[in-house]
Image (tube, rainbow, N blue to C red):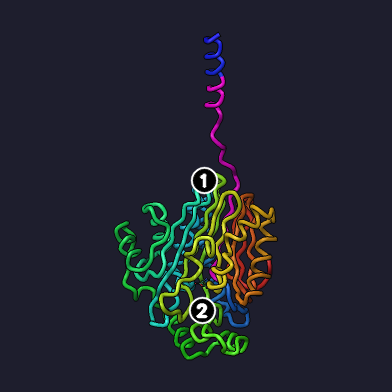
Amino acid sequence: MKKLLIIISVFFLNKVLAQPTPALTDKYVLVIHGGAGTILKSQMTAEKERAYQAALNQALDAGQAILARGGSALDAVEASVRILEDNPLFNAGKGAVFTNEGKNEMDAAIMNGQTLAAGSVAGVTTIRNPISAARAVMEKSPHVMMTGKGAEIFAKQQGLTIVDPSYFRTEERWKSLQKAKAGDSLQKRKKDSILKKTTAFSEFYDSPLGLTGKYGTVGAVALDRHGNLAAATSTGGMTNKKYGRVGDAPIIGSGTYANNQTVAISCTGWGEYFIRLVMAKSISDMMEFGKMSLRDAAHEMIMKRLPALGGDGGLIAVDKDGNIALPFCTEGMYRGFVKSDGSKAVKIYKEYN
Ligand code: ASP
């Protein structure tokens, strides 16, 4: 009897061990953004439009190459974001906006949807690619978030490229700071008139989403062929920010979130509102506990609750089944996606999808 039991056990054990590891699917999806804001065709030159499109395509191609060969969503989102960080057109890495003190202080975050591991950095001024520092925090430290000098020392120890702060400077962003300081912004005037200058807030900030040059946070979300999700966001924050202000991008659950059970999300917009709405995690919860579709949950948050609170912006998202959403309540959002089924698009202006 004992022998028989052993034979039966071995038989079943072999069966279990013989189960193939989950096969690599063919399906992958990558979505990217280069910031939301007052992006009007009337204010864009054909040459600039082409430059933005080329940059977005380059970022998509880099991430897609990784996903197509069975690489991880994490590697893909980091690769796409690094390209956008290196491009001075966007408010992340080189080309980051200036603080009130005339510095470039950057925030970034990355999250692995398979493990819920996450890493972020805030207020860094010398790390060439903040997104890679965020990844190092996630993978090489027991922490989730590091700020300022400490984050920079850690990044250097990890062998990341450290640059002189002047590397991030661009003339266009410098001019935007001067404009913002002079209060020469339509957005500010709009906010001021809405708020009737009754809050201190309008004195401190110019919207990050105002005129040309003030938007451009970058981000990427991906579903890889293993079924894993990841999200990454990197930003210079808001022009004219003061007092060590940190936005939503490096706050896990606000500007960046990924969970294999639901969705991967990267946000762009007026960070204070995204933090207060716990934007990305709220959408994940609406999907997980409220059984809402990605499209409905993202629409509810971006098109209704965000403007209702007085904020604006947009996001990119891909859910566990590969559905995507790119809602925004601003005039435009630099954005693009590529899927394993061959579909690919890069868009700038309003055209909800
Ligand atoms: N969300 C960013 C921040 O508030 C800004 C942006 O997306 O343009 O820091």
Foreground residue among 72 and 255? 255
Check the image and report above or below for 68 versus 5: below
Mark closest to the chain's N terminus, 2 or 1: 1
Any mark on residue 214, and which? 2
Q: In this view, does 93 lie to the left or right of 253?
A: left
Residue 190: x percent and y percent?
Answer: 60, 86
Whether the magenta-drawn stretch holds residue 21 is answered as: yes
Q: Does the residue labelled 2 lie within 8 Å of ligand 1?
A: yes
Badge 2 density bin: few <14, some 14–19, many ≥20, Cα 10 Å:
many
Q: In the rendered view of the protein, which quadrant contains the C terminus?
A: bottom right
Q: Which of 15 and 332 is in front in this view?
A: 15
Which stretch did the figure color magenta? 12-35
Q: What element carries label 2?
A: loop
Tag on residue 241?
none
Q: Classify 154 as above or below 28.
A: below
Q: In which quarter of the image is residue 207?
A: bottom right
The disc at residue 70 is 1
Q: Which of 2 and 190 is in front in this view?
A: 2
In the foreground, 333 or 69: 333
Instruction: Reply yes or no: does residue 319 show up in magenta.
Output: no
282 relative to 97, above or below: above
| Labels 2 and 1 touching (C-beta < 8 A) | no
Which amino acid is tagged 2? Lys
